[in-house]
Image (cartoon, rainbow, N blue to C red):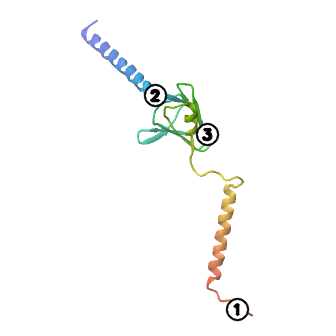
């Protein structure tokens, strides 16, 4: 083996060792992973939110947000599973499982029982029509005959 081949082999080996060490360091700083990802699940990364994926490792302080129709489980290494349903948020932290489960919060307006978007649009349309009638007759003189 000549010197160039040996130097190239040593360079490749050093790069592989560095990559494995980096991956181990990143995994060592994590406490949980995403599981059963369904729909659009977002995970904070630096100053942005990125799409989450199954088996993605999670660090303390990362936020997980589910959108409409999405679900995910934050599976802690200690065995605690925190389930998020649609439109929920959770921040990864260390704690007892019951405390972690209570940290899941719902985002967006809470639905009102029996009220649909069609009901809201109907009410808004009726209110708009009523206001238009008011404006039309506001300055009209009314005869007493």
Q: With respect to residue 48, does 112 lie above or below? A: below
Secondary structure state at the residue bearing disc 3: loop
In the image, what residue occupies the spot 64% across and 70% down? 128
**Residue 11 falls in image quadrant:** top left
Dot 3 or dot 2, earlier in sequence: 2
Quarter holding the N terminus is: top left
Dot 2 or dot 1, earlier in sequence: 2
Please state the horizontal and vertical placement of residue 26, each as a whole percent of the image: 41, 26
Tag 2 near tag 1, CB within 8 Å: no
Please tell me how many numbered marks the rendered image carries. Answer: 3
Asked whether the viewer can see residue 4, the reply is yes
Q: Residues within 10 Å of mark 2 (few under 14, many from 20)?
A: some
In the image, what residue occupies the spot 47% across and 41% down? 49
As drawn, the residue found furthest toward the top would be: 1
Q: With respect to residue 35, does 68 lie above or below? A: below
Q: Residues within 10 Å of mark 1 (few under 14, many from 20)?
A: few
Secondary structure state at the residue bearing disc 1: loop
Q: Which mark is residue 30?
A: 2
Cα separation between marks 3 and 2? 23 Å
In front of the other: 14 or 21: 21
Disc 3: which residue: 85
In the image, what residue occupies the spot 33% across and 17% down? 12
């Amino acid at each position: 083996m000549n010197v160039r081949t040996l130097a190239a082999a040593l360079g490749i080996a050093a790069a592989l060792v560095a990559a494995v060490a980096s991956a181990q360091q990143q995994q060592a700083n994590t406490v949980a992973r995403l599981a059963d990802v369904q729909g659009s699940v977002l995970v904070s990364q630096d100053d942005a939110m990125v799409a989450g994926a199954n088996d993605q490792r999670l660090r303390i302080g990362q936020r997980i947000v589910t959108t409409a129709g999405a679900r995910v489980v934050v599976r802690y290494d200690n065995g605690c599973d925190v389930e998020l349903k649609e439109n929920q948020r959770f921040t990864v932290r260390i704690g007892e499982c019951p405390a972690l489960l209570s940290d899941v919060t719902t985002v967006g307006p809470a639905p009102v029982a029996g009220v649909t978007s069609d009901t809201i649009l109907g009410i808004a349309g009726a209110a708009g029509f009523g206001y238009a009638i008011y404006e039309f007759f506001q300055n009209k003189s009314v005869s007493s005959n």
